[in-house]
Image: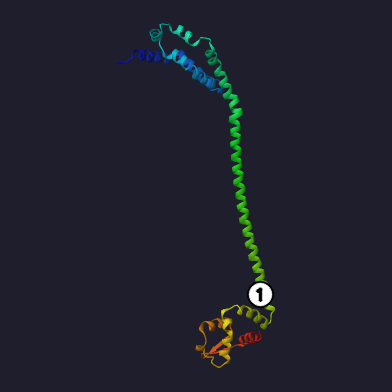
Amino acid sequence: MQNPDKGVVYNNMDTILNNPISESIGENIKKRLNSPIYGTFFIFWLILHWRFVFTIFFMSEDAIIEKTGLLKNDYLVMTFFTYDFYFWILTFAPFLMTYIAIWILPKYVLIPAFEEDEKNQTTKIVFRITEEKRIEDAKVQKEEAVVKKVTAVAKQAVQEKKIKENLSEEEKWDIEYLQFKKAQAFQHFRSFLQTVYGGANYKHSFDPNVLAEVDSFNLIEINDNYVTLNKKGKYFSRLYSSK
Protein backbone atom coordinates (compact mmCIF):
# COMPACT_ATOMS: atom_id res chain seq x y z
CA MET A 1 0.00 0.00 0.00
CA GLN A 2 1.40 3.43 -0.97
CA ASN A 3 2.22 5.82 1.85
CA PRO A 4 -0.09 8.91 1.56
CA ASP A 5 2.64 11.12 3.02
CA LYS A 6 4.98 10.22 0.16
CA GLY A 7 2.28 11.07 -2.36
CA VAL A 8 1.80 14.45 -0.76
CA VAL A 9 5.56 15.05 -0.75
CA TYR A 10 5.95 14.07 -4.42
CA ASN A 11 3.00 16.28 -5.47
CA ASN A 12 4.42 19.15 -3.47
CA MET A 13 7.86 18.66 -5.09
CA ASP A 14 6.32 18.73 -8.57
CA THR A 15 4.43 21.93 -7.75
CA ILE A 16 7.56 23.58 -6.40
CA LEU A 17 9.83 22.55 -9.27
CA ASN A 18 7.38 23.80 -11.92
CA ASN A 19 6.62 27.03 -10.09
CA PRO A 20 7.88 30.25 -11.85
CA ILE A 21 9.09 31.54 -8.49
CA SER A 22 11.16 28.39 -7.98
CA GLU A 23 12.59 28.75 -11.48
CA SER A 24 13.52 32.36 -10.74
CA ILE A 25 15.16 31.36 -7.48
CA GLY A 26 17.03 28.60 -9.31
CA GLU A 27 18.36 31.02 -11.93
CA ASN A 28 19.46 33.45 -9.23
CA ILE A 29 21.20 30.68 -7.31
CA LYS A 30 22.92 29.55 -10.51
CA LYS A 31 24.28 33.07 -11.07
CA ARG A 32 25.45 33.30 -7.48
CA LEU A 33 27.17 29.95 -7.74
CA ASN A 34 29.39 31.35 -10.50
CA SER A 35 31.17 33.27 -7.73
CA PRO A 36 33.42 31.02 -5.63
CA ILE A 37 32.49 32.93 -2.47
CA TYR A 38 28.72 32.68 -2.92
CA GLY A 39 28.99 29.16 -4.24
CA THR A 40 31.11 27.96 -1.31
CA PHE A 41 28.89 29.74 1.21
CA PHE A 42 25.75 28.25 -0.35
CA ILE A 43 27.18 24.72 -0.27
CA PHE A 44 28.17 24.99 3.40
CA TRP A 45 24.86 26.63 4.32
CA LEU A 46 22.93 23.92 2.48
CA ILE A 47 24.90 21.15 4.23
CA LEU A 48 24.30 22.64 7.68
CA HIS A 49 20.62 23.51 7.05
CA TRP A 50 19.54 20.53 5.00
CA ARG A 51 16.71 19.68 7.42
CA PHE A 52 15.36 23.22 7.15
CA VAL A 53 15.50 23.12 3.33
CA PHE A 54 13.96 19.67 3.21
CA THR A 55 11.09 20.77 5.46
CA ILE A 56 10.33 23.87 3.36
CA PHE A 57 10.43 22.26 -0.05
CA PHE A 58 9.59 18.62 0.48
CA MET A 59 7.17 18.38 3.41
CA SER A 60 3.53 19.36 3.00
CA GLU A 61 1.66 21.28 5.65
CA ASP A 62 -0.81 18.41 6.01
CA ALA A 63 1.99 15.99 6.78
CA ILE A 64 3.44 18.38 9.39
CA ILE A 65 0.02 18.92 11.02
CA GLU A 66 -0.60 15.19 11.14
CA LYS A 67 2.80 14.54 12.67
CA THR A 68 3.18 17.51 15.07
CA GLY A 69 -0.21 19.22 15.22
CA LEU A 70 1.44 22.49 14.14
CA LEU A 71 1.08 24.61 11.06
CA LYS A 72 4.06 24.54 8.75
CA ASN A 73 5.17 28.11 9.60
CA ASP A 74 4.80 27.49 13.33
CA TYR A 75 6.74 24.23 13.01
CA LEU A 76 9.56 25.98 11.14
CA VAL A 77 9.80 28.77 13.72
CA MET A 78 9.68 26.45 16.72
CA THR A 79 12.12 23.95 15.22
CA PHE A 80 14.70 26.07 13.40
CA PHE A 81 14.50 29.55 14.99
CA THR A 82 15.01 28.72 18.64
CA TYR A 83 17.84 31.27 19.07
CA ASP A 84 19.76 28.90 21.27
CA PHE A 85 23.48 28.10 21.11
CA TYR A 86 22.99 25.55 18.33
CA PHE A 87 21.01 28.11 16.28
CA TRP A 88 23.83 30.64 16.40
CA ILE A 89 26.40 28.00 15.50
CA LEU A 90 24.40 27.06 12.39
CA THR A 91 24.01 30.76 11.55
CA PHE A 92 27.67 31.78 11.68
CA ALA A 93 29.29 28.47 10.78
CA PRO A 94 28.77 28.89 6.98
CA PHE A 95 30.53 32.29 7.11
CA LEU A 96 33.44 30.87 9.08
CA MET A 97 33.70 27.78 6.90
CA THR A 98 33.57 29.92 3.73
CA TYR A 99 36.31 32.19 5.07
CA ILE A 100 38.48 29.19 5.90
CA ALA A 101 37.84 27.52 2.54
CA ILE A 102 38.39 30.66 0.41
CA TRP A 103 41.21 32.44 2.27
CA ILE A 104 42.79 30.37 5.02
CA LEU A 105 42.95 26.93 3.41
CA PRO A 106 44.50 28.10 0.10
CA LYS A 107 46.94 30.47 1.81
CA TYR A 108 48.28 28.10 4.44
CA VAL A 109 47.60 24.67 2.94
CA LEU A 110 46.78 24.51 -0.77
CA ILE A 111 49.23 27.12 -2.09
CA PRO A 112 52.18 25.88 0.06
CA ALA A 113 51.35 22.32 -0.97
CA PHE A 114 51.27 23.39 -4.62
CA GLU A 115 54.55 25.29 -4.23
CA GLU A 116 56.18 22.28 -2.56
CA ASP A 117 54.95 20.00 -5.32
CA GLU A 118 56.30 22.40 -7.96
CA LYS A 119 59.64 22.52 -6.15
CA ASN A 120 59.76 18.73 -6.09
CA GLN A 121 58.94 18.57 -9.79
CA THR A 122 61.61 21.19 -10.52
CA THR A 123 64.14 19.29 -8.39
CA LYS A 124 63.38 16.10 -10.31
CA ILE A 125 63.78 17.88 -13.65
CA VAL A 126 67.07 19.50 -12.55
CA PHE A 127 68.34 16.16 -11.23
CA ARG A 128 67.37 14.40 -14.46
CA ILE A 129 69.09 17.09 -16.56
CA THR A 130 72.18 16.95 -14.32
CA GLU A 131 72.39 13.16 -14.58
CA GLU A 132 71.90 13.24 -18.34
CA LYS A 133 74.63 15.87 -18.64
CA ARG A 134 76.93 13.82 -16.38
CA ILE A 135 76.36 10.73 -18.53
CA GLU A 136 76.90 12.76 -21.69
CA ASP A 137 80.10 14.26 -20.26
CA ALA A 138 81.31 10.76 -19.34
CA LYS A 139 80.63 9.59 -22.90
CA VAL A 140 82.48 12.60 -24.30
CA GLN A 141 85.44 12.00 -21.97
CA LYS A 142 85.53 8.33 -22.96
CA GLU A 143 85.43 9.23 -26.64
CA GLU A 144 88.15 11.84 -26.13
CA ALA A 145 90.28 9.26 -24.29
CA VAL A 146 89.82 6.79 -27.14
CA VAL A 147 90.72 9.47 -29.68
CA LYS A 148 93.82 10.43 -27.67
CA LYS A 149 94.86 6.79 -27.37
CA VAL A 150 94.35 6.14 -31.08
CA THR A 151 96.20 9.36 -31.90
CA ALA A 152 99.07 8.40 -29.58
CA VAL A 153 99.28 4.92 -31.09
CA ALA A 154 99.21 6.40 -34.58
CA LYS A 155 101.93 8.89 -33.70
CA GLN A 156 104.00 6.13 -32.15
CA ALA A 157 103.54 3.98 -35.24
CA VAL A 158 104.58 6.87 -37.46
CA GLN A 159 107.60 7.56 -35.29
CA GLU A 160 108.57 3.89 -35.25
CA LYS A 161 108.16 3.76 -39.00
CA LYS A 162 110.39 6.80 -39.43
CA ILE A 163 112.95 5.30 -37.07
CA LYS A 164 112.92 1.98 -38.90
CA GLU A 165 113.30 3.72 -42.22
CA ASN A 166 116.49 5.33 -40.94
CA LEU A 167 117.86 2.13 -39.42
CA SER A 168 120.38 -0.10 -41.07
CA GLU A 169 119.44 -3.67 -41.93
CA GLU A 170 121.28 -5.10 -38.94
CA GLU A 171 119.70 -2.53 -36.58
CA LYS A 172 116.29 -3.63 -37.81
CA TRP A 173 117.30 -7.25 -37.22
CA ASP A 174 118.39 -6.36 -33.69
CA ILE A 175 114.84 -5.16 -32.99
CA GLU A 176 113.33 -8.28 -34.54
CA TYR A 177 115.70 -10.46 -32.53
CA LEU A 178 114.22 -9.01 -29.34
CA GLN A 179 110.81 -10.11 -30.56
CA PHE A 180 112.20 -13.51 -31.54
CA LYS A 181 113.49 -14.04 -27.99
CA LYS A 182 109.86 -13.98 -26.83
CA ALA A 183 108.82 -16.67 -29.33
CA GLN A 184 108.42 -20.34 -28.45
CA ALA A 185 110.99 -21.32 -31.10
CA PHE A 186 113.70 -19.39 -29.25
CA GLN A 187 113.71 -22.07 -26.53
CA HIS A 188 114.56 -24.68 -29.19
CA PHE A 189 116.86 -22.45 -31.21
CA ARG A 190 120.04 -24.09 -29.85
CA SER A 191 119.02 -27.60 -30.98
CA PHE A 192 117.75 -26.09 -34.23
CA LEU A 193 121.17 -24.56 -34.96
CA GLN A 194 122.96 -27.76 -34.00
CA THR A 195 120.83 -29.67 -36.49
CA VAL A 196 121.47 -27.11 -39.23
CA TYR A 197 125.22 -26.93 -38.67
CA GLY A 198 125.54 -30.64 -37.87
CA GLY A 199 124.72 -31.63 -41.41
CA ALA A 200 121.42 -33.36 -40.61
CA ASN A 201 119.53 -30.46 -42.04
CA TYR A 202 116.87 -32.36 -43.86
CA LYS A 203 113.43 -30.84 -43.50
CA HIS A 204 112.02 -33.94 -41.82
CA SER A 205 114.73 -33.73 -39.15
CA PHE A 206 113.14 -30.65 -37.56
CA ASP A 207 110.15 -30.21 -35.33
CA PRO A 208 107.46 -28.92 -37.72
CA ASN A 209 106.22 -26.33 -35.22
CA VAL A 210 109.68 -24.96 -34.52
CA LEU A 211 110.52 -24.96 -38.23
CA ALA A 212 107.32 -23.06 -39.04
CA GLU A 213 107.93 -20.43 -36.38
CA VAL A 214 111.57 -19.93 -37.38
CA ASP A 215 110.44 -19.58 -40.96
CA SER A 216 107.85 -16.98 -39.89
CA PHE A 217 110.76 -14.74 -38.85
CA ASN A 218 112.28 -15.26 -42.32
CA LEU A 219 115.47 -16.88 -40.97
CA ILE A 220 115.76 -19.90 -43.28
CA GLU A 221 115.61 -21.06 -46.85
CA ILE A 222 114.26 -24.48 -47.86
CA ASN A 223 115.56 -25.96 -51.10
CA ASP A 224 115.01 -29.59 -52.09
CA ASN A 225 114.00 -30.41 -48.49
CA TYR A 226 117.25 -28.97 -47.20
CA VAL A 227 117.07 -26.26 -44.55
CA THR A 228 119.75 -23.57 -44.51
CA LEU A 229 120.07 -20.26 -42.72
CA ASN A 230 119.81 -17.14 -44.81
CA LYS A 231 121.72 -13.93 -44.10
CA LYS A 232 119.24 -12.86 -41.44
CA GLY A 233 119.23 -16.32 -39.88
CA LYS A 234 123.02 -16.35 -39.66
CA TYR A 235 122.90 -12.93 -37.99
CA PHE A 236 120.40 -14.28 -35.42
CA SER A 237 122.71 -17.27 -34.94
CA ARG A 238 125.65 -14.99 -34.11
CA LEU A 239 123.51 -12.99 -31.68
CA TYR A 240 122.34 -16.19 -30.02
CA SER A 241 125.87 -17.58 -29.77
CA SER A 242 127.19 -14.35 -28.25
CA LYS A 243 124.60 -14.13 -25.44
Horizontal side of 8 relative to 37 (left or right) equals left
Q: Nearer the viewer, residue 209 or 222?
A: 209
The answer to which of 186 and 122 lies nearer the viewer is 186
Quadrant of residue 217 within the rendered picture: bottom right
Q: Residue at image x 58%, y 81%?
A: 187
Q: Is residue 31 visible?
A: no
Q: Residue furthest left?
A: 1
Please tell me which residue is depicted at 63% across the width and 54% down the height of the picture.
Answer: 137
* 23 displayed left or right of 167: left
Image coordinates of residue 229 in percent, x first then y, are 59, 88
Q: Secondary structure at mark 1?
A: helix
Determine which residue is flagged by label 1. 161
Q: Residue at x 57, y 18 (%)?
A: 95
* Vertical side of 182 occupied by 123: above or below: above
Q: Position of residue 1 (x, y in %)?
A: 30, 15
Q: In percent of the image, x 64 and y 60: which residue is there? A: 144
Q: Amino acid at mark 1?
A: Lys
Q: Is residue 204 at all visible to an observer of this figure? A: yes
Quadrant (top left, top right, bottom left, bottom right) of the C terminus: bottom right
Crowding at mark 1 (Cα within 10 Å: few <14, some 14-19, many 20+): few
Left or right, 157 with reference to 90:
right
Q: Quadrant of residue 12?
A: top left
Instruction: Tell me which corner region of the image, top left, top right, bottom left or bottom right, holds residue 146.
Output: bottom right
Q: Percent from the top left, x then y, of residue 196?
A: 57, 90
Q: Residue 171: x and y, percent? A: 68, 81
